[in-house]
Each structure stands twice: as C-alpha cells, then as structure tokens.
Amino acid sequence: MMSNCLHLGLILSVLLGFAASTGGNSNENEDEYLTQREYILEKSYHGLIRENETLVEITPLIKVDEEKICNFRILKKPYHEIPFQIELVNNLGILKARRTLNCEKRKSYHFEIVAIYCDGTPSNPANVHITVIDINEYAPTFLQPSYVTEVDEGKLYNEIIRVEATDKDCTPLFGDVCKYDILNSDEPFTIDNEGSIKNTEPLSHKISHNHILSVVAFDCAMKESTPIMVSIKVRRICDAKFLGIPERIDYTSGSTESLQLFPNARLDLCNILCSPEELNIHAAVVLKTKHISFGCDRDISNCTASSKLKDLLPRGAEWTKELSFDEGPEPIFHFDGNAGVVLPDSLIGRHDFSLHSFSIVSVFRHASQSPPLNKHVKEHILCSADDHKMNRHHMALFVRNCRLILLLRKNYNEGDLNIFSPAEWRWKIAQVCDNEWHYYVINYVEQSGKVELFIDGVRFESSVEDRHANPEVIDDWPLHAAHGVNTTLSVGACFQSSENRLKHGFLGDISVVKVALNNILLPADIKCGTSCAEHLLPATPEADSPNTEQDVQVQLNAKMNEIYIEAQSKHKIEQLMRKIQYINAKKSPTIGRRNIEVRTTMMCTNQSALRLPTIETYIMVNEPIQTPAGILGTDAERETDVDTDRETDTDSIVDGQRRKLAVDKLKGEQFPGKIAISDTKLFSYSLLHTNDVQEPKSHVHAIVHKAEASHPTMLLILICVFLVILLCGVSIARLKNNQKYSDRHQPCPKAADEGLIWDDSALTITINPMQTDAASEESSDSENSDSEDDEVIKDGFAHINQLEWDNTNMFSSAN
C-alpha cells in the first residue's frame, strides 16, 4: 500500500513539473486541438446511388482517424425520412441505403452528418446531397389498350389516327418515348415518331374492309413496349351525292347582306333502294376559315382589351423590318429557328415580370416536324434574359416537345433562397404541333401566383393523365443576385449575353405578340378578341308545314360555323340546303377565300349508314364594286358644272389641255403600243376590272383574278358606256355652239395660244388629288408587293380609278 502511494506521488510530481515547464503554451495547444476537432469533416459531400443498389458513391471520401473518431451520426429533421445509414470502416465513412430507392418517387435527398469522437462529442456538421440515378426499369405503355377508327376508301390521309405511349422512368433517356413502329410491314401504313399513322396508298373496301396493325413504342434507350392493336376500318363510298353545288361562291366585301350558298342544291340518291318511311338523311355544312385571318374575320375595334395591350411585334417598326413576313390585314412573320428580334428598352423598359400581374397574347402557328427534331430544344416566342455576363432566363414563353411552357423565375430579394417556388408551367396540348393558327392568352396573377391558359378563347382546364399533371408545374430556386445585370426582351428567340447573339429560335409563323402589364385580361376581353364576325345562317323550318318538328331538325353550333340538318325525305333536305346563307358583318372583311365542306350521311332502317362523298367548295370575298355614279356624278351636278364652265376664261382651257396631255402621257407609259385606244374604251375596260379578286398568298400581296361578271353586271357596264358616249356627244355639240358664240363676240385668240386649240377627239380627264391621297392610304398595306404582274395592274387601273371628269375645262368659253 505504501509503495503504491509512492508511485502515485511520483507520477503526480512529474506531471506537475511538466505543466510548470510548459507554462503559457497550454492554451495554444488546447486551441489547436479544438480547431482540429471542429474541421475534421468537409463542408459538403455529394453522392450517387442507383435505384437497384444500396451503396452510395461519395465524393470526396469521408476520411477520418479511427484513433480519434469512433462513430458517425445522421442528423434527422422532423417529418423527413432519411433511408440511409453510415458506418466507420477502415478510417472511411461508408454510406448505405437501408433499402433500394425509387427515382420515380424521389430523385434526391439532403441531410447532415457529424463524426463522433471517442469521448462522445460530435464534430462539425457536413451537408450531404445524394442523387438517385435512374435505371431503365419501365417499358413504355400506351394510354389505351387498343385503338379503333374508320376511314373512307380511295383517299390518302395526312393522319388517320394518333397513338400515344408514356414511360414511368424519371429521366428523359429512359422516360421519354422517342419512337413508334408497326410490326406487320405488309400493311400500307406508316407511323412517325409522334405516333401519327397514315396510309401510303388509297384503301379499298373491296380488297380489305378492316386493317389490323400491331404497334409498339420505344423509349429513348430503345426499350420496347408490349404491342397493341390498331384497327382501321374502311368505309365504302356510295355514288350518291349532292349536285348543283358551285365550285366557287362570290361574296362582295362590305355588303353586310347574307348570301345563299346552294340555291340549286339537288340530292342524287343513285341506286339506293329505301322507302321514304325508312330513309333518314344527315347533312353538315362547315365553314372553314383557319387559313384566313387566323380562324375567321374578327372585329376587335370594340374590345376593351386593346387599350391594355402593348404590341411587341408591330408591322413597320424598326425592330421588325428585317423579319420575313407576309403583308395583309394581319401580318404573318416567318421564323426559321434562327430569326428573332430584340425589343428596344423604350417599348417596355427593364420590366420584372415576377413582381406584377401580366397577360401574354400570342397568335402563332407552330410547324409540326416529321421526323421531329431534338425534343429538348426550346423554341422561344417571348424571352426576357440577362443583357450581359450571364445567360439566365427570367421570363419566357416557348415550345418544347409539343408543349407550351411558361418560365417565370423569382429574384433573390423576394424570399428565402432555400425555398422552392413554382417556376415553370408546362401544358401538353395538341394545338402546339398541329400546324394550325391558334389564339393563346396566358394570365399571371402575382398575388396568388395563379397562371391561366386560354386557347382560342376557351379556358384550359387542368387534368391528370396517367398520374401526370397537365399542366406540370416545376419548382426552382430563386435567382441569385447579379450586380449591374439588367434584362433584354426578345421575340422569336432568346438573347444569350455570353455569346452576344440570339438562340433557341422559334420554327413557324407568328402574327401577334402582345403583353398587358400590371393587369390581366378578363374572360370577356378574351372572348371579344376571338369572336367571329362571319358565320353561317341556317334555314328555318317552314311555318306552313304541319310535320316540321317531327321530321326536320336544324342545329347551329356556338361559333355559328357549322350547321347540322336532319330530314326524312329527299325534298326536305334539298329545301333546307338551299336556304343556308353566309354573312360577314365586319365593315372591311378580309379579301380572300373561305373553304366550305359539305358532309352527308344516309341511313335506311336496319341497314348500315352510307357516307356520301364530301363536297368541298369555297366562298371568295371580293372587293366592293365601284358604281359609275360615283365617278360621273348626277345629272344636276353635270348641269351645274356646265353653267360654271361657261364663265371660265381662256386660261382654264389652256390648263385643261395641259392636264389632258399629262394624262395621255401617263396612259402611254402604262399601255405602250395602245395610245390609239380611245378614252371611252379605256374607261370601259377599267370598269370591267373593278371586281377583280385578291387571294392571299405567301409574299404576294395581291394577284389579279379574271373577272367573272354576271349578266346584270355586263348590262350595267353597257349602260355606263352608252352614257359616256352620249355625254361626249352632248359635250362636243355644246362646245361647238360655245365656240361659234365666242367667234362672234370675242376677239381672236393670241398667236401664242394657237398651239393650244381645244382637241375634242377625247374627253378631258384629270387626277383628283383627294382621291389619290385616299387611295394611297387604303393601299398602304400592299406597298411592298413582290408580284410584277400585280404592279402593272396597279399602275394600269389603280390610277384610272383615281381619275374623274374635269368639267371645268370641257365647256369653258372666253369672256
């Protein structure tokens, strides 16, 4: 016992001596030791783990000293599951998953770890970010177990039916469907990478009344789906058809009167044997105006929304002059994927769209590619991006993979940088890739963060398809602060400041891009902008028919561009067809063509329906005919002019002769080789062409159509020519009488005026400057015509239409 105490005392004295010898260095060693304990781990680690594995690949490695560290601990947050565990093995922290993970449910995990010293104290915490790597575990699946459709024989279709498959994998490589294929290659059909099936040759009901196709889908890693069946039935076309439907129907612009479309319609039933009691006939008349004025003639002059909107793509602006476009009532700008325009700062300024409510209005037609290009390429309609240094997109409206996407990123000063917020709205809609014009309106309400989409005036309703939301809303971090960086607004592409050029361009046609700042468009405003001024008028059942309600039905859709008729007799269906009318209430309708389609189906009791051949015709809206009364004037006006002319002096005659010589010279330039044509014939010729038609065509503002004047029009022209000749005779007779009177009571004209003696071989014509100015304003939309023939006609007849009679010189006499 004594010896133990001596040993203990000796050890204690040594330690005390050592402490005394070290003196002031003890505090420094202690600080160094604490620093090493605090920074034993890195600030953050990144890990990767595959769906079918449990070991996490960590970068950098979690290295520690086992003499100091005895364990690790994962710091769990409330209500967050962390399916991982960490162990100390050979000076390394090994991170494993407790079970296999699912990328489709959760793509990443965030948590913190600490190292536990052997004395039980924890080290500094370190952030761990783990990403779950997708594996191709799912094959594509079709939205329907099978597809069935019908087609008419003898036709080639651009699309018969469209199939669609989806993939549950979470990454684009494994989760996007990139290809479709038809397994039975002996069938006359093809399918593109969008799932659109069409026939390669006209089908025959006699050869095969039903084609069965086996179709599969592939993801981008070429994993194949289970085949599905597509049944395409071929309908037999009966020889029965409507007769008396004209190939072209002319409508005069600005008449505001209705026009009967088929006054001579007659139904030929061919060899169909069916008693009147068993017969039932359905007819549909459809007005198709998608190619004209983007759906139909619209009159937005009374819409209150027009005052709220700023036009970002105006016609004739400095920033749109270099774009390729078709000029017309509504311009069409062409974008080839490389074109785009940067808007001046004076138009909107450096506007932060995330801070205020706004509306975007756009009318565009997106080209459908077959085969498609890269599905992940963005095609911008509108983009607000950094003006220098970086390529951050603050607000954008673009198309990608047949989806319309709105991007809206909040800035760093609007909230916590660590909080996700909605940043992308992705609408999967067929209109984006159908190569047709559509009217899109997007409303963003800043207070609630609500986003609405309207397509052709109809609100898009959210839906869930195969557990996929539509629209899909993607969250993202707020944008970090960037000192001195402003934004650049562009249309048709997005500005990349690091490359100092526009990229991600739109492929298609755009007519309208407008924005409303600090407010949104109301549903009434949107409806007003899409309402049609032209429509069909159905026949009303005859009041004196006692059985009208029983055997006749007439229906008109909401847009008034489709009429459905049902009758139980050939005579009644003909009467209803003959009374269908077209009207255009717009004050200045768009000149051009409107397609009309007539579809007819006949049914007999206990027999299959027979579809008659579809009839396609069109309405041509022509320019209004100018009446001769507006040019010649009334009889009273002519008499007044004669009385006034008698008081005109000799100088007026000289001025009239000079104007006549100028007009003759102008006609000589426009009609070389024909100064021999009399003024009367020239005037008649111009009248014959007052009803020329202009049809819209790409890069051609107007082309001349041959006049198809009716018999009443020809009679009117002959009467006008007769009046002109009669007026010439009366004018010449009065002029001779006036000259005789002048010879008796007036001195002889001076020798200097002898060269300007009145020439009564033709009428004096002068140009009215007021009509010239008016015509110049009216024709401003077609100044840049590319058609040489059109320019000749303009020079030949447009000037003639601006000529009027100069009665002040025709009947003048010297005082």
Image (tube, rainbow, N blue to C red):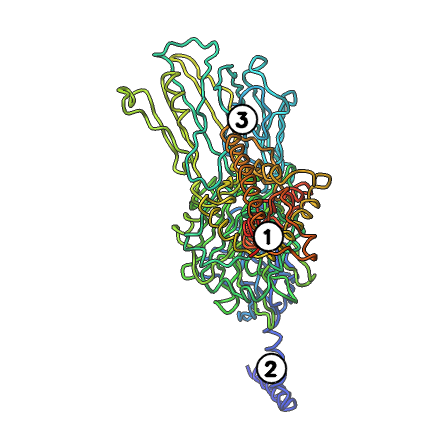
Which residue corresponds to the image point at 41% horizontal and 38% vertical from the top-left? 559
Does dot 3 land on a helix, a strand or a loop?
A: loop
Q: Label 3, on which residue?
A: 247
Residue 45, horizontal then vertical, whole percent: 61, 62
User: Residue 167: in sight, yes or no?
Assistant: no
In front: 85, or 88?
85
- Separation of disc 1 and disc 3 at Cα? 41 Å
* Neighbour tally class for label 3: few under 14, some 14-19, many 20 plus, Cα within 10 Å: few
Q: Label 2, on which residue?
A: 30
* Amino acid type of the residue tagged 2 in the rendering: Glu
User: Residue 325: in sight, yes or no?
Assistant: yes
Does dot 1 land on a helix, a strand or a loop?
A: strand
* Amino acid type of the residue tagged 3 in the rendering: Glu
Q: Is residue 214 left or right of residue 283?
A: right
Residue 235, horizontal then vertical, whole percent: 51, 18
Q: Label 1, on which residue?
A: 380
